[in-house]
Amino acid sequence: MAKTYRTVSGTIFDVANYLFLGLFAIGAILPFIYVISGSFATDAELTKRAVFLIPETFSIAAYEFIFSTDTILKSIGVSMYVTIIGTAVNLFFTVTMAYPLARRSLMGRNTVLNLVVFSMLFGGGMIPTYLVIRELSLLDSYWALILPGAISAFNLIIVKNFFQELPPGLEEAAKIDGCTELGLLWRIVLPLSKPVLATFTLFYAVGHWNDFFAALLYINNPEKWPLQVLLRQIVLLSQAAAGDLNSMDPNFVKPPDQSIKMAVIVVGTVPILMVYPFLQKYFAKGVLIGSIKG
C-alpha cells in the first residue's frame, strides 16, 4: 500500500484546524459544565466564586426543592407526550406532503410549492392564530401544542429535495414488480431516507421539548403545563409551582435562587440531550443532504 506524504502547509492547516475546533468545543461545553456545577453549589460558594467547574461543597438542595412534589414529574410526562406525539405528527405530514411534491409530474406542484414558500415569509400573527385555536375548541388541549406547527415549511422543502435525489430507477423497478405508491414510499423510499428522517426527528423533538410560548398562550390549566412552562414559573417565583415550602421539612433551607435557575437548566436540557446519541450516526449526513438541489 502506497504511503501518503503530507505537505508542510497541509500539516499546518490540520494543526490550526484542530486547535480552532478544540477551542470552539471547549468554549461551548465549559458554560454548561459551570451550570451543572453551580446547580450543586451552596449560596456562599456562588457568592464567593464567580466561575468554577467543581463545587467545593456538594449540595443537592436545589434539586430537592425542584422535585419536592410530583408536579414536575407530571410536567415531564406532559412534555414527553407532546414531544413524542408531536414529532410523530410532524414526520407523518412532512413525509406525506414532501413525497408527492417531489414528483415533477404532479399537477399544480409549482403552485403548492409557492404557497409553501409564501408561508415561510408571511404568517397570520399571534392573535389570529389564538382566535383560530379558540374557535376549534383546542384551548387547554395538548393538540393546541401540536397541530398549529404540524409541518415546518423549511423542513418540508429539504425532505422534498432529498426525495428528488433518489435514483428514479428504483421507482421504475418497484412499479414493474407491482408495487403501489404507498408500498413504494414504505418499502423503498423511507428505508433509504433514514439520515434525513433522523435529522428532522431531532429537530422536531427539540422544538417541541423547548417550546413554552405556545403552552403559555393556549394552556390555562396548571395540571397540563409542560416542563418548560413549569420551569419558567420556578425561575420567576422560586416557590409554589414545583415546591410548596409549607409542605417541606421544617428544617429544610431554601436553596439560593441562582442554584435553582442552574438546576432548572439542567433538568430542562439533559432529557433531550439523551436522544442525540441514538440519532448521531445519521445526523451529520442528514443535516446536509437534500440541501443542494431545488
Image (cartoon, helix red, strand yellow):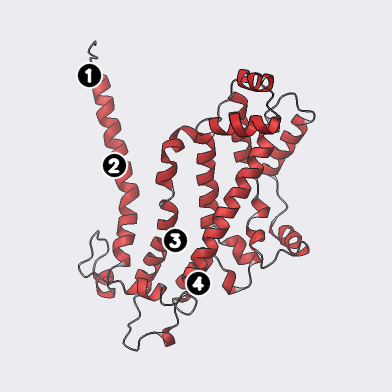
- Camera-side mark, 1 or 3: 3
Nearer the N terminus, badge 2 or badge 4? 2
Nearer the N terminus, badge 1 or badge 3? 1
Q: In this view, does 9 lie to the left or right of 105?
A: left
Q: Image height check: is 144 above or below 285? A: below
| Residue 34 placement: quadrant | bottom left
User: Residue 146: percent from the left, percent from the top?
Assistant: 63, 55
| Residue 268 image label | 3
Q: How far apart are marks 4 and 1 (CA)?
A: 57 Å
Q: Mark 2 points at which residue?
A: 23
Q: Name the residue under label 1.
A: 8
**Total numbered labels:** 4
Q: Distance between the residues labelled 2 and 4?
A: 35 Å
Q: Quadrant of the C terminus?
A: top right
- Kind of residue indicated by mark 3: Gly
* Residue situated furthest front in the rendering: 177
Q: Mark 4 points at which residue?
A: 233
Q: Distance between the residues labelled 1 and 3?
A: 47 Å
Nearer the N terminus, badge 4 or badge 3? 4
At horizontal 57% and vertical 50% (from top left) the residue drawn is 87
